[in-house]
Amino acid sequence: MDRESLIYVDRNGTDCLKWDGAKSRFGEGGLLPLWVADMDFQAPACVREAVASWAAHGAYGYYQTPDRYYKAFLRWEEARHGYAAEKEWLRITPGVVPALYWLVQALTAPGDGVTVLKPVYYPFFGAIQDSGRKLLSCDLVNENGRYTMDFDALDAHFASTGSKLLIFSSPHNPVGRVWRRQELEELCRVCEKHGVTILSDEIHQDLIVGSNPHIPTATVHKGPTVTLTSASKTFNLAGLQNAFVVIPDEDIRRKYDAFTDAACCGGGPSVGYVAAAAAYTGGAPWLESLLERVDENYQALCAEFNDRLPEAVISPLEGTYLVWIDLRRCLDPENTKFIVQEVCGLAVDYGDWFGGDAFKGFIRLNLATSLDNVMLATARLLAALTD
């Protein structure tokens, strides 16, 4: 399979959230943005051609979900990840985050506890707290930058809290873990013991940088599992608002459908269907080029840090295009934002966003950009932290 070349684009002045929205988010302009998780590359040629053809037709009226869209996703899941899902299990949403909000509200009652494993993607917290549920956490264990789950602690957590819902990140954002089968089996054993439903956010499932394959949680868990995923992260389509919720359990489907029907909030824009179907059908060569670029950027960043600032702890990047860096040995955690933003001129995701004060001194950098941008950010950080 011949790879498709990536095309880097200047996104300034395009109303791009990552670049043009950084001033609003961080309070100042001119920052080099390595924060929100999308890419500075054009989508695959097959996607651009499909969207251009759709746009050229010129009639943008009501649109039914095309059968080729379902088929393309189901083929991709089975061929790429060994997950033989069925069409009747699929529900369409504008994104993974809205679906998490809807699932939390459909499957729990106000005041119920919902568990996460911190540090973790911070919209999980909003899906719980904004819905009037109680945010519970059983933190991951940090072993010099490599994160693991503490299954004894998780067992005790479920026993003491009575939590029946876990929102799980796989591959993990922000720490970059691709969970091994043995880890997933043990997690699922604990959840089955306590009757816990797993909402498995697998939006980064295709972004595997290391040698360990992504294993869908639903292929391991004998209990109820809902999988949430999308072409958006894989092929840089987030603005087209299209994601899948895969619900094998009939009772959960019924509850989810009742909630979304009452809120009239299912489906997504027609162009999202067109783009996702094209990506899943013909985007694999482009994805291989992307993974090569992300690994190149990661290795270059690690080489510079290892040479000039070995005190920094960079978590091994097994999946996603997001690198998690522990700078606590290099700076006062309370000064992280000042140094990174004011001294280095960078817009990044800060560690405390992913779980509170315990993660001050950490940053998450987005590597789905040019090597030049990654090296510029690295140079600025090293200059500030080695003076």
Image (spheres, rainbow, N blue to C red):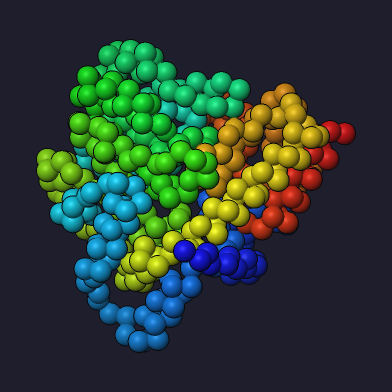
62 left or right, relative to 51:
left
Which residue is painted at 32% across and 80% down in the image?
A: 60
Quarter of the image for residue 243 reads bottom left
Nearest to the observer: residue 365 or residue 189? 189
Residue 218 showing in the rendered view: yes
The quadrant holding residue 369 is: bottom right
**Residue visible at 18% across and 56% down?**
87
- For residue 324, above or below residue 46: above
Quick one: quadrant of the C terminus? top right
Q: Is residue 85 left or right of residue 307?
A: left
x and y percentages locating residue 13 in the rendered image? 63, 69
Q: Choose between 172 and 3: the one closer to the eye.
A: 3
* Residue at (79, 45) in percent of width and height: 379
Whether residue 97 is visible, yes or no, is: no
Up/down of 59 relative to 230, above or below: below
Name the one closer to the observer, 316 or 10. 316
Residue 175 position in % (x across, y down):
53, 34
Q: Which residue ends up furthest to the front in the rendered image?
A: 1
